[in-house]
Image (spheres, helix red, strand yellow):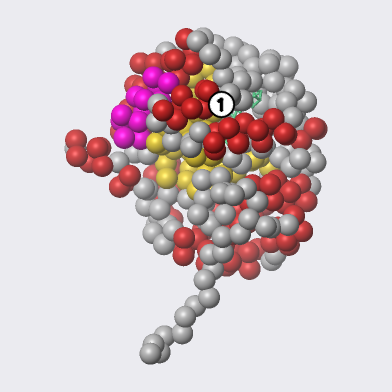
Amino acid sequence: MTLTPTRPAAVQLRHDWTTAQIQELLELPLIDLLWRAQAVHREANPGYRVQLASLLSVKTGGCEEDCAYCPQSMHHSSDVTGRPELEVEPVLARARAAREAGAQRFCMGWAWRDIRDGAPFEAMLQMVRGVRELGMEACVTAGMLTDAQAERLAEAGLTAYNHNLDTSPEHYDRIITTRTYQERLETLERVRRAGITLCCGGIIGMGESLTDRASLLQVLATMDPHPESVPINALVAVEGTPLEGQPPVDPLDFVRMVATARILMPHSRVRLSAGREGMTREAQVLCLLAGADSIFYGDTLLTTGNPDVAADRELLAAAGVTPWEEQLPERSACG
Ligand code: SAM
Ligand code: DTB
Ligand code: SF4
């Protein structure tokens, strides 16, 4: 007989959330929302470990899609212009440097509508193999793909494919007209079928309502299994894009999104993504408290800025959370 009362488990793995239930969570008094999110997070990730993921844009600008937020679209007049694609060796040198700086995951981006076969795809596969040989997780984001391409990426050892839903199905047509929500879902299914983990999230601050935010989270949280990684971005309003005049996201609304994602998807990595440069360290600490367990690490995202490595080391130390170093046995073995 035990005299210790058992606590009800905070972690509930569900795939049947409704948008109304999710909106109720988003609208909870912040203090109560944080309490619930923390209870889930402490049970699912008791060490409060944070994964550091570095990003590199391999193919920058000149993209034929018209995503209203994106400085890389050829439809907009931002300062980002098409640049030659990076080659395999310089990319792997950047991955090595990211590993030396403490990153556990290396994410590579291509400003493409879809993956092209031939030399660029063969180079992508070599980059994936090279990153995996460094003992790091490898993530690619390069638009839509075919089943055959997904299978070859899986064979090369790709850990994750990032393809965001970006916003709710209802708000989507105001943001992108050159590919459909359904096409995005089909890409995600192909990635899943190939056995690659999913990195899928969205952006807030694009003129969406609270119901849109709940609806985006509903699509993610009713996937079975949940995406292993869920990036939450705040819009970086870049000059020359149609969304350049959007008001900045209230950091506490960002905290609400993170906390709600944590409650809905207890075991997913909730990644604090674009928009951290506009946030105080206190707001970022609240995000960590709310259940964020990953950040983009390094002073550039794809084309825009991000806090530098020293600032992030200081942030994590101030919050008292530890990076996920032990995922790199090769690194510690080599000294
Ligand atoms: N072209 C590929 C695609 O769209 O899937 C991969 C690269 S794309 C730049 C990756 C993601 O970055 C987008 O889906 C979007 O969520 C995010 N992103 C792009 N520009 C952003 C911005 N200005 N603010 C916040 N997030 C942004
Ligand atoms: C994600 O959700 N956010 C990252 C990563 N996945 C690829 C990209 C953010 C890009 C922000 C704008 C830029 O730097 O161009
Ligand atoms: Fe192209 Fe991706 Fe930017 Fe859309 S988000 S314009 S697909 S690079």
Task: Name the residue located 68 percent from the left edge and 16 percent from the top edge.
Answer: 64
Task: Name the residue located 52 percent from the left edge and 71 percent from the top edge.
Answer: 9
Q: Is mark 1 within 8 Å of ligand 1?
A: no
Q: Is residue 230 inside the magenta stretch?
A: no
Compared with residue 128, is residue 182 higher up or lower down, i.e. above or below?
below
Compared with residue 111, is residue 20 higher up or lower down, i.e. above or below?
below
Percent position (x, y) of residue 114? 61, 20
Q: Classify mark 1: helix, strand or loop.
A: helix
Mark 1 closeness class: few <14, some 14–19, many ≥20 residues within 10 Å: some
Observer-nearest of 232 and 224: 224
Query: Which residue in the structure is indicated by mark 1?
Result: 147
- Residue 136 placement: quadrant: top left
Observer-nearest of 46 and 264: 264
Compared with residue 1, is residue 46 higher up or lower down, i.e. above or below?
above
Left or right relative to 101: residue 232: right
Q: Which residues are magenta?
A: 125-136
For the stretch drawn in magenta, the main secondary structure is helix
Q: Can residue 24 be seen in this snapshot?
A: yes
Q: Quadrant of ligand 1?
A: top right
Task: Name the residue located 78 percent from the left edge and 26 percent from the top edge.
Answer: 177
Left or right relative to 318: residue 325: left
Q: Can residue 285 be seen in this snapshot?
A: no
> Quarter of the image containing the C terminus?
top left
> Quarter of the image containing the N terminus?
bottom left
Left or right relative to 250: residue 272: left
> Which amino acid type is marked by label 1?
Asp
Percent position (x, y) of residue 7? 49, 78
Observer-nearest of 193 and 256: 193
Compared with residue 265, is residue 43 higher up or lower down, i.e. above or below?
below
